[in-house]
Image: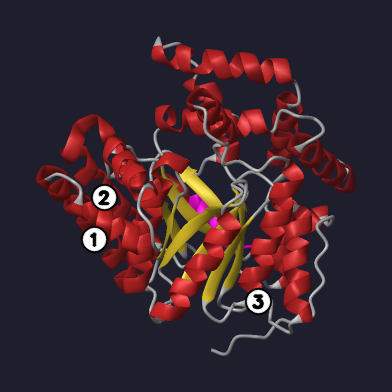
Amino acid sequence: MSVQVLSNVNVSFDNTEKAFKYKTDAELKEANFLFASMGYQWLVNIGSRLTPWALKVGLPIKGLIKKTVFKQFVGGETLEETIPVVKKLAEFGVGCILDYGVEGGNDGEIGFDHAADEFIKVINFAASQSSIPYMSIKVTGFARFGLLEKIDGTMAKESGSLIVKYNNTLLKLSAEEREEWARVESRMDKICTAAANKKIGVLVDAEETWIQDSVDALTCLAMDKYNKEVCIVFNTIQLYRHDRLAFLKLMHEAATERHFILGAKIVRGAYMEKERERASEQNYPSPIQPTKEATDVDYNAALTFCIEHIKNIDVIVASHNEYSNKLAIQLLNEKEIPLNHPHISFSQLYGMSDNITFNLAAAGAKVTKYLPFGPLDDVIPYLMRRAQENSSVSGQTGRELLLIKKEIKRRGI
């Protein structure tokens, strides 16, 4: 079946009928109540502190959590529980990125092997559903943090390209550490082989700066192996770091030289406070951009670079920023690149920015929701982050509430 070419497309993110068509009146009212509640900073602060404690001591609050923030932001506790959400999104042309926050660190090597197996289970499940093109992994799920940190620190002292520094660093590890790292490489290869066989994209999450170089090297080597014809492996580029735009360009040079497709999921970032605190405590320059505006400038520059080199960069525009999404559409139009070009897709978190997601989907773009799933206790940290980032009335909550209320008024409910 031929693919319709979609060019010179204009998309409005103000159309609430398209944005919330997938929600019933009752679900829309529930979302309105939840986002209104998250507008109270004091309430979110208290909830963020008390919820983990209440769960730990066994207070009966799981039912309340599952009916509110869990329902809004998480697909379910198991893969099977995500199916209704996946199918509902698919009805409106929206795919999913499955994310299981599996942690293998508590049980050592056995736990790491289990984590890799769990990621492969997610890949197999994704392949059984027609609207799940991607899944995400965290290298810290199947590799010891301390080893990643040692490799990263040693790489920082080396000169040359990322891979040259990586190879030189491995020579300086102890025999035991090299054996341990070989098991990490084997787990990564098993995951990517399964994904390639099933044609499911693997999005490698970004990590803290003090282990990111080791993650980047592992991911770059996987891209070199698996991205020769189609893009299977994607690295996550956090543009709130002031060095990532330059890094993206270096990776593109490597991809061009080595003849592989660069997979790039571009995001603004997720570890800002932790990064700044550590830099201050250890007295080294902060890796974080000096201002929000600087982050925006680099994000949009990265987006522009990816579209300019769309022939051998497969980019996922992972953003809740309306301007950046509109810029992507504008650039595609200017360069006469179809909106549904196979090397560009868009993504937002499940439960947020539906006005962007569903209006893009209605225009024919390839768009996904990042859909976390897992046992309630395991996803609490994720839920607390969503509540915290939505607690500023001048920020996300204000925008979400405005759109929800607009749709409630339009429906007359």
Residue positioned 25% across, 30% down in the render: 106
The Cα atoms of the two marked residues, 1 and 2, are separated by 8 Å
Please tell me the numbered disc located at residue 190: 1
Crowding around mark 1 (Cα neighbors within 10 Å: few <14, some 14 to 19, many 20+) is some
Q: Nearer the viewer, residue 251 or 401?
A: 251
Label ID, residue 308 = 3
Q: What amino acid is at disc 2?
A: Ala
Q: Residue 116: which disc?
A: 2
Residue 255 drawn at (x, y percent): 45, 74
**What amino acid is labelled 3 in the image?**
Glu
Task: Identify the magenta region.
Answer: 84-92
Is residue 140 visible to the viewer in this orientation of the structure?
A: yes
Give SS at disc 3. helix
Residue 236, how many percent across, how many down? 50, 55
- At a point 57% along the width and 63% down the height, the residue shown is 316
Q: Main secondary structure of the magenta part?
A: helix
Q: Is residue 217 left or right of residue 270?
A: left
- Please tell me whether mark 3 or mark 1 is closer to you in this view: 3
**Residue in the picture at 47% in, 18% down:** 52
- Label 2 near label 1: C-beta < 8 Å? yes
Which disc number belongs to residue 84?
Answer: none
Q: Are the residues flagged by discs 3 and 1 in contact, CB closer than 8 Å?
A: no
Q: Secondary structure at mark 1?
A: helix
Neighbourhood count class around disc 2 (C-alpha, 10 Å): few under 14, some 14–19, many 20 upward: many
- Name the side, left or right, on which 36 lies relative to 217: right
Judge whether residue 136 is colored magenta.
Answer: no
Judged by depth in the image, the label closer to the viewer, 3 or 2, is 3
Residue pushed farthest bottom?
2
| Amino acid carrying mark 1 in the image | Lys
Q: Secondary structure at mark 2?
A: helix
Q: How is the image coloured?
A: secondary structure
